Amino acid sequence: MAAAFPFNESHRLRRLKTFGILDTPAEEHFDSITKAAASLLQAPIALLNFIDETREWCKSAWGMEPRWAKREESLCAQALLTNDILVIPDATADEEFRNHPQVVGERNVVFYVGAVLKASDGTALGTLCVIAHEPRKLSESERATLKTLAEHAVLHLEKRQASAELLEMRRCIDEAERHQEEFLAMLAHELRAPLAPIQAGIAILDRPEATDAERAWAREIVRRHVGQMGHIVGDLLSTSLATTGVMQLNPEPVSVKNLIENALELTNAAIVDRGHTVSISVDASLYAFADPTQCSIVIANMIENAAVYTPANGRIHLTADGDGLNVFIRVADNGIGIANEDIDAIFKLFKQGKRPLARSVGGMGLGLTLARNWLSCTAGRSLRVVRASGAVASSRSAFAARLLENHRPPGPPKLWRHQPHRCPF
């Protein structure tokens, strides 16, 4: 016989799996419930069953060995459809059930009652059923008590689930606090590190006998390290605005080519300092619907990450294309790559992968967190890590930003290629 399914079957199965009860060992608490149910009705068998996609799985059995049954051969699967309680006083005399496999088969079910196990949101999970081998009737008090036992079984499940969720929440809070402490320690280091060279530069500028060359060098030192501190403070402010949703974005049709050019201007120093070669391939007529300022910063963060994690004289390759709905901007390099276990961590605030930023390059490692937050604020766009293939020799991973494509202006598309060279500008 074909199995029947509740109208909310997909939700029901998802809810069932959240309890993690299937295929678990016997437990004294549930065994006490089936024992009480059998005693209540003076019946030889009581079962606590859960119904998954294909089977009736028994968590607890009183009066027989726990076993599973095919869902299409399960009386409990039929009871599940009532979302309340199914009572069959005499299955052998019931036209609907007289030929049921559990009636004519080994179980020899004659009397059956199954109270549905319902979660607090009303989702049916399984049944607490009682079986006898002779006909009998069910009184109203027995009916009510059996339903109470079924509710007690589910209540125990939900309390256990809530306890597990609280423990996991506590673990997440502890982990977040630990990462925040690490972050603050790193922040103190990053803000303190530029002070020594700034003080040294000021001391040189205060010396009357300092030469013009020495003064120029000192001004450059002060300028560079003040800029580094400003970059850190700016990242912190932007992180606060982006994570709290205060930042206002103003999306508009914008040339992807212009976005990439602006991003290269922002990262020119990092690229030149490390002697990287940059190559670009993008459809010059490709337009996106995005905030031009913040989107350029997103791409710049992707490029800067590639520049920092790529050894000197490396190669960075940018591509952009569209599929009519989305624009995909990818940044690949031949650097150290990203380990699979670090992919989620690198986008989290107060957390980095196992290859932290070198102290010599400065910064707080907030760029990728900001980039993902900004994109998620723009029509649900995303930033993710992909495995690169063919873009750059020896490339093991790349970043891909997904933007909303805008209608292209009239005219045939023209391919814009930025030829590889040492200094982009």
Image (spheres, helix red, strand yellow):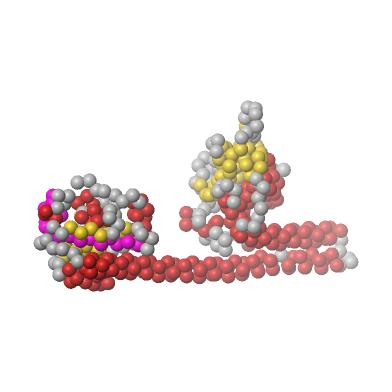
- Confirm whether the magenta stretch covers residue 241: no
Name the residue nearer the viewer: 270 or 162.
162
**Residue furthest toward the top?**
412
Give the x, y percent position of residue 287.
63, 37
Residue drawn at the location 62% of the way across and 40% of the way down: 288
Give the x, y percent position of residue 27.
26, 70
Name the residue nearer the viewer: 127 or 283.
127
- Confirm whether the magenta stretch covers residue 103: yes
Name the residue nearer the viewer: 129 or 243.
129
- Which residue range is magenta in the image? 98-119
In this view, 286 is above or below 199: above
**Residue furthest toward the front?**
140
Question: Which part of the image, by quadrant, shows the C terminus?
Answer: top right
In-image side of 290 versus 3 (left or right): right
Q: Quadrant of residue 42?
A: bottom left
Residue drawn at the location 55% of the way across and 48% of the way down: 380
In this view, 47 is above or below 71: below
Q: Is residue 303 shown to the viewer in this render?
A: no
Give the x, y percent position of residue 344.
50, 56
In-image side of 362 versus 330 (left or right): right
Give the x, y percent position of residue 127.
26, 61
